[in-house]
């Protein structure tokens, strides 16, 4: 019966309760949508980083990542890549050679990271081929070996499809090696930093320039069926590639790992700030509700309703009010997030800024469904905490005076 | 049989500049089945006396014993429980819960007592019929007249089967017809069911119906007449 009284009391002053419910709903909707938007933004960053740059797991010779020297290679790299590709939950594995060359073009010079790839295997792991905006995907169209450059580098060095560049690097024997390549294609990912730094050539062309043994590779990039499998699959890869360094994308890009790991905490803090602001409104509403009912509360005390039950009744009212607004806000937030999950938000007006951070200009909002329980708990706690002061105020009433209040 | 025994009761309100002796050494007792009116001018102390008898206010000195229990010695929690089980209240302004129907208002106290639904339903129906509101059980207070609301309040006061009912100026907000009607009902309940009623009142019509009239002035009993 107390539950029923509390619920009816919520609707006693309809306008006041509706205004409060609308404020709670709006606040939570904004918080949840923001949560889904930020989640979508970082998902897009992770997606672009893993699909175009890092893949999910990489295998290197020990210390290769500390100093990219060509003699730190993975022996029998091709065979190892085949074995890894056959593991459970692994989608594909691509062997790569890596060099850090000096690039000379007619209109400028620059540095970068050159990846020697098997074009077909790389297609299965990264999506660079889908980001081609000009030319072909490492198809040999002239005597010179083809190279794929990023749009940012192409703009910087004024390169076009067919332009010749000269690549200088230190070969396997420590000598300076120079080789000409012709730009076969220009790609553009969502990350301009990546586009400026990375060049792709056929693995055999880079091998001949470095002078490394035929079965050696510097990196095996592994794509999993889902990025969340990385910690589960990593031990199996490590077992297969014994003695090698095996790292997941989170280890390869710790800054991204920090963002994703702390994302939930940031979002809860954000929602908490909204709820704290709403707390003051709820306290005010509940205080008004108590002060308007002094006579009634006095009567309840007089006829024998004990303090605990009166306290519970007021707490219940506040929780019901908050939960009603909270659930409306949560449902609204999830609903709108779902809409923008299907129809991503176009942020091309901010393309330049977003691409500097490797983020897509189309953000598909993603509501983190694992947060639902925590969100509802936070809403209930807000209602509960907000009611403590008004409830204590009610308990301090003297029934003899309260029943005679005008 | 005595159900209330009051001995040397004093109540002093200490204000910032003056102290008010609202109840000044009252000794009295109430027998079971009495229909008593406490009368006196405004500020004479009748409401304070009623509040102390009902355990809603503390006495400064003296004692109130209800069927052998000294209520001023009970803890706040026990006193609340005691009120629920032993005392019925009727207030001047009815003080019904506006979000509940007449029936729910009456059964609320039985709910607090933990009565079973079937018992609650039967008693509520019986009481509302007794006060002439059998057809209006599902109406909320806002859909009832002042007299009808006060009758619901009487039914509520009786719902817990109390030892006595304290009614603080129950007719103050009612017209003559509603007053007569309410007094008839209370008189009938008193005669037929031996329910003890104690009123504080200014209303001559209540005084006329009462079988015992205690007059108070300046916190003291100046007359106690049994008719």
Image: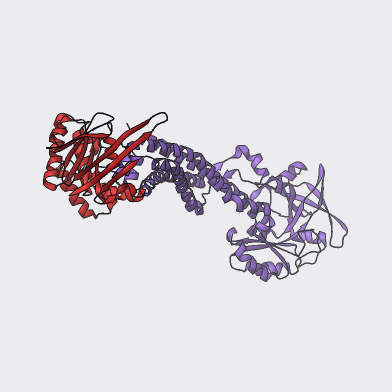
Q: Spot the red chain and give its letter.
A: B
In front here: B86 or A333?
A: B86
In front here: A312 or A37?
A: A312
User: Measured along the vertical axis of the image, is residue A310 above or below residue A289?
Assistant: below
> Residue B24 appears at what percent x and percent y?
30, 36
Residue at (63, 63) in percent of width and height? A92
> Residue A6 appears at what percent x and percent y?
34, 44
Quarter of the image for residue B224 reads: top left
Residue at (14, 47) in percent of width and height? B194
User: Measured along the vertical axis of the image, is residue A187 above or below residue A226?
Assistant: above
Tell me if residue A96 can be seen: yes
Q: Is residue A123 left or right of residue A164?
A: left
> Residue A75 appears at what percent x and percent y?
76, 69
Residue at (50, 41) in percent of width and height? A30
Q: Quadrant of the C terminus of chain A?
A: top left
Residue at (80, 67) in percent of width and height? A213
> Residue A125 appears at what percent x and percent y?
64, 59
Q: Is residue A13 left or right of residue A343?
A: left
User: Measured along the vertical axis of the image, is residue A245 above or below residue A24?
Assistant: below
In front here: A106 or B122?
A: B122
Q: Is residue B52 left or right of residue A395?
A: left
In front here: A213 or A72?
A: A72
Q: Residue furthest right?
A: A175
Q: Colour of chain A?
A: purple
Identify the colour scheme used: by chain
Tell me if residue B104 can be seen: no
């Amino acid at each position: 019966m107390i539950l029923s009284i509390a619920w009816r009391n919520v609707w006693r002053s309809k306008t006041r309760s509706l205004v409060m419910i609308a404020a709670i709903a709006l606040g939570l909707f904004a918080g949840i949508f923001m949560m889904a938007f930020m989640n979508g933004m970082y998902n897009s960053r992770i997606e672009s980083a893993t699909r175009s740059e890092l893949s999910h797991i990489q295998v290197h010779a020990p210390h290769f990542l500390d100093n990219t020297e060509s003699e730190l290679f993975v022996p029998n790299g091709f065979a190892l890549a085949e074995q890894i590709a056959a593991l459970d939950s692994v989608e594909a594995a691509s062997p790569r050679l890596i060099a850090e060359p000096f690039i000379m073009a007619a209109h400028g010079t620059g540095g970068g990271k050159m990846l020697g790839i098997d074009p077909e295997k790389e297609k299965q792991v990264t999506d660079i081929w889908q980001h081609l905006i000009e030319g072909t995907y490492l198809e040999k169209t002239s005597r010179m070996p083809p190279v794929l450059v990023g749009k940012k580098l192409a703009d910087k060095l004024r390169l076009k499809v067919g332009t010749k560049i000269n690549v200088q690097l230190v070969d396997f024997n420590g000598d300076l090696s120079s080789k000409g390549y012709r730009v076969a294609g220009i790609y553009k990912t969502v990350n301009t930093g990546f586009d400026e730094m990375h060049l792709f050539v056929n693995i055999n062309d880079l091998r001949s320039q470095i002078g490394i043994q035929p079965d050696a590779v510097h990196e095996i990039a592994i794509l999993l069926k889902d990025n969340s499998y990385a910690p589960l699959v990593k031990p199996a890869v490590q077992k297969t590639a014994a003695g090698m360094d095996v790292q997941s994308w989170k280890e390869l890009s710790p800054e991204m790992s920090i963002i994703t790991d702390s994302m939930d905490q940031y979002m809860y803090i954000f929602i908490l700030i909204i709820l704290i602001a709403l707390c003051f409104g709820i306290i005010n509403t509940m205080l008004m509700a108590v002060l308007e009912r002094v006579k009634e509360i006095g009567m309840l005390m007089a006829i024998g309703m004990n303090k605990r039950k009166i306290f519970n009744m007021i707490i219940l009212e506040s929780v019901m009010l908050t939960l009603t607004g909270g659930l409306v806000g949560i449902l609204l937030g999830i609903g709108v997030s779902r809409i923008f999950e299907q129809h991503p938000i176009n942020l091309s007006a901010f393309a330049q800024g977003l691409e500097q951070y490797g983020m897509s200009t189309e953000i598909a909002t993603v509501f983190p469904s694992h947060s639902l329980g925590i969100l509802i708990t936070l809403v209930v706690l807000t209602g509960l905490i907000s009611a403590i002061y008004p409830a204590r105020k009610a308990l301090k009433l003297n029934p003899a005076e309260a029943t005679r209040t005008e | 049989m005595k159900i209330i025994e009051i001995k040397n009761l004093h109540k002093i309100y200490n204000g910032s500049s003056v102290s008010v002796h609202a109840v000044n050494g009252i000794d009295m007792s109430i027998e079971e089945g009495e229909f008593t009116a406490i009368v006196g001018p405004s500020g004479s102390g009748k409401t304070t006396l009623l509040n102390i008898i009902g355990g809603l206010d503390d006495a400064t000195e003296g004692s109130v014993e209800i069927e052998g229990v000294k209520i001023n010695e009970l803890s706040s929690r026990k006193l609340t429980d005691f009120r629920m089980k032993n005392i019925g209240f009727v207030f001047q302004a009815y003080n019904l819960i506006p979000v509940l129907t007449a029936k729910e208002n009456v059964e609320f106290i039985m709910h607090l007592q933990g009565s079973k639904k079937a018992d609650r339903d039967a008693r509520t129906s019986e009481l509302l019929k007794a006060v002439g509101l059998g057809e209006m059980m599902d109406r909320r207070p806002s859909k009832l007249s002042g007299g009808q609301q006060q009758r619901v309040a009487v039914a509520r006061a009786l719902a817990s089967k109390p030892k006595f009912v304290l009614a603080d100026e129950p007719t103050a907000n009612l017209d003559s017809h509603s007053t007569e009607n309410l007094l008839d009902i209370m008189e009938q309940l008193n005669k037929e069911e031996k329910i003890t009623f104690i009123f504080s009142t200014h209303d001559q019509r209540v005084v006329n119906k009462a079988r015992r009239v205690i007059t108070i002035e300046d916190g003291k009993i100046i007359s106690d007449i049994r008719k």
